């Protein structure tokens, strides 16, 4: 199953991306959304910001986020631990929350077939 099944993929676009070919930036995403949906970049920017804010709010509340054909996000807690520095001092590191992302099957297959 291709990531472009049933719709145009964000990444199959003619939009000129930023100067660094190794990164697809937020502004590139906004330009792509604006182009594919015939809207202004200002409106597309609001749409993209709303999506990111919604995902962030859900994760902040401890809710897992699953986006079909893309991936899932969740917050994981890295347990507290102690470690020794190269100078020999023992340092305590508290629990830390981290965002984990796991690609779903469609995204994995799209990347593997690229």
Image (cartoon, rainbow, N blue to C red):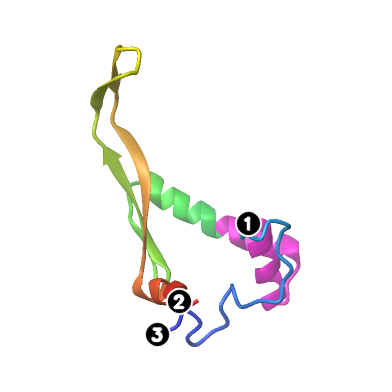
Residue at position x 49%, y 88% from top? Answer: 6
- Where is residue 68 shown, x and y percent of the image? 39, 72
**Residue on which disc 3 sits:** 1
- Where is residue 3 shown, x and y percent of the image? 47, 79
Task: Tell me, yes or no, whether the highlighted magenta stretch contains residue 114.
Answer: no
| Number of the label disc, if any, that sits on residue 26 | 1
Label located before the other in sequence (2 or 3): 3
Residue at position x 34%, y 18% from top? Answer: 86
**Is the N terminus in the top left, top right, bottom left or bottom right quadrant?**
bottom left
| Mark 2: few/some/many CA within 10 Å (<14, 14-19, 20+) | some
Judge depth for marks 1 and 3 and give the one in front.
Answer: 3
Dominant SS in magenta = helix
Picture quadrant of residue 25: bottom right
- Residue at the far bottom in the pictured view: 6
**Residue on which disc 2 sits:** 110
Query: Is residue 91 visible to us here?
Result: yes
Residue at position x 71%, y 76% from top? Answer: 14
Image: 91 above or below 61: above
Residue at position x 29%, y 26% from top? Answer: 94
- Residue at the far front in the pictured view: 86
Magenta stretch, residue numbers: 26-50
The CA span between labels 1 and 3 is: 26 Å
Picture quadrant of residue 91: top left
Image: 75 above or below 25: above
């Amino acid at each position: 199953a291709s990531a472009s099944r049933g719709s145009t993929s964000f990444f199959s676009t003619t939009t000129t991306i930023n100067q660094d070919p190794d990164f697809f930036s937020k502004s590139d995403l906004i330009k792509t959304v604006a182009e594919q949906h015939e809207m202004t970049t200002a409106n597309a920017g609001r749409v993209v910001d709303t999506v990111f804010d919604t995902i962030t709010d859900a994760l902040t509340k401890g809710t897992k986020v699953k986006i079909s054909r893309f991936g899932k996000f969740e917050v994981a807690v890295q347990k507290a631990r102690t470690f020794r520095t190269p100078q020999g001092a023992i340092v305590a590191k508290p629990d830390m929350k981290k965002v984990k992302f796991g690609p779903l099957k469609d995204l994995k297959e799209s990347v593997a077939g690229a």
